Image (cartoon, helix red, strand yellow):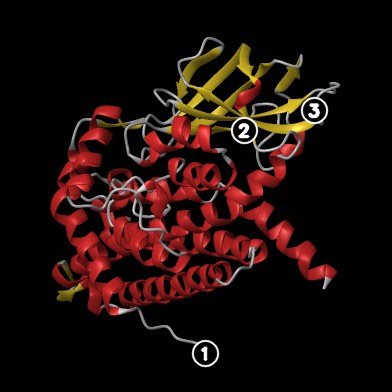
Amino acid sequence: MIDFAIPADLAAERDRVRRFVIDKIVPYERDPRLTAHGPTDELRQELVELARAEKLLTVQAPESLGGRGLTHIEQAVIYEAAGWSTLGPVAMNCAAPDEGNMFLLSKVADPAQVQRYLAPVVAGYQRSVFAMTEPDGAGSDPAQLSTTATFDGENFTINGRKWLITGANGAKTWIIMARLAANPHLPEGPTLFLADGDQPGIVIERTMNTMDRNYVAGHGVVRFDDLVLPREALLGEAGQALRYAQLRLAPARLTHCMRWLGAAERAQSIAIEHARTRTAFGKPIGEHEGVSFMLADNEIALHQCRLTIWHACWLMDNGQKARHESSIAKSFVSEELFKVADRCVQVLGGIGISDETVVEMIFRDMRAFRLYDGPTEVHKYAIGRKVLRG
């Protein structure tokens, strides 16, 4: 049976989330603590407490950790509502990279690691990072991983350099990918490790200047300088990091799509209101075909993106990995929503490139969406290979 109806209780919660974001979170969009490098930790904590008071904090987490254990479809509905403001997911603790990291740790971490590294992130008291991307190539192609780890039977020693590490400055829970060298104790190869952010050997060199500003503390350049970790720091099995990364990335691609769908809807609503009230050549500009067609194209794209997301979520809720479908969703949705944001800027005209509305910020942030968690071209390459294999 194919059913596109949203259950009444889920629709009610969606509306509650949207109202919370509009009433409580949108006013913070002009807070000076929303810096060129994203929200500060102080602003994040203030927003988190607002969501906590409304019982809207980390609702996606497993029930065993205090969340509601939302299905992927339920996440799609709630995250879209939260994404009305780029600060909405920050407040509700369902923004990247924490959302994806929490999902991974809930699947792979052992009970002691859950209590030490995951539970405080779920509770909103600390942030996390996923340190994989490197200046020398590891990113979309993690096989180029050059950060190394050695193991002497008791301790791991990690050395290497990472960049574009979202939220590195101030994060407490670190997931680090490094290539474990051959040793007589454990399998070699790409491996994940857990660390505390304030441990000696983790050196934050700088925060990078980027065009987006929706992630807490921005994106950092990090060096691991003889970072020593105990055997208990091993996350999952040695040599299995690439498999675990895929476990994290497939749903994370979709949650990006969900959140940005909400932001694109916001931009569209602003463009529609402008088209109704701004006049040119004797009538509202929305009555001119050039403008009305752009708004129509946006509406079509938003609808298509929502259905694409829902289909991939439905597959995962029914036990499928949906890697192919999540790649389709990520490549299609990121490109289409960027076009939506671009057309909204065009409809707004001069004010579209100013900070008179949030559309210009959404546009800049949306451009980055086409790159992270795999650029469009990498996803299309994977989709093409699967198509050719039949």
Q: Mark 2, mark 3: which one is toward the viewer?
A: 3
Q: Mark 1, mark 2: which one is toward the viewer?
A: 1
161 horizontally vs 272: left or right: right
Residue 163 vertical placement versus 369 (above, below): above
The percent coordinates of residue 322 (x first, y second) are 63, 65
Separation of residues labelled 3 and 1 (CA atoms) = 48 Å
Q: Amino acid at mark 3?
A: Leu
Contact? badges 3 and 1 (CB < 8 Å): no
**Is residue 78 visible to us here?**
yes
Give the SS element for disc 1.
loop
Q: Amino acid at mark 2?
A: Thr
> Pointer 2: what residue?
133
The percent coordinates of residue 180 (x first, y second) are 76, 25
- Residue 231 lies in quadrant: top right
Give the SS element for disc 2.
loop
Q: Earlier in the sequence, mark 1 or mark 2?
A: 1
Residue 343 vertical placement versus 206 (above, below): below
Separation of residues labelled 1 and 2 (CA atoms) = 42 Å
> Pointer 3: what residue?
186
Contact? badges 2 and 3 (CB < 8 Å): no
The percent coordinates of residue 339 (x first, y second) are 45, 61
Q: Residues within 10 Å of mark 1 (few under 14, many from 20)?
A: few
> Pointer 1: what residue?
1
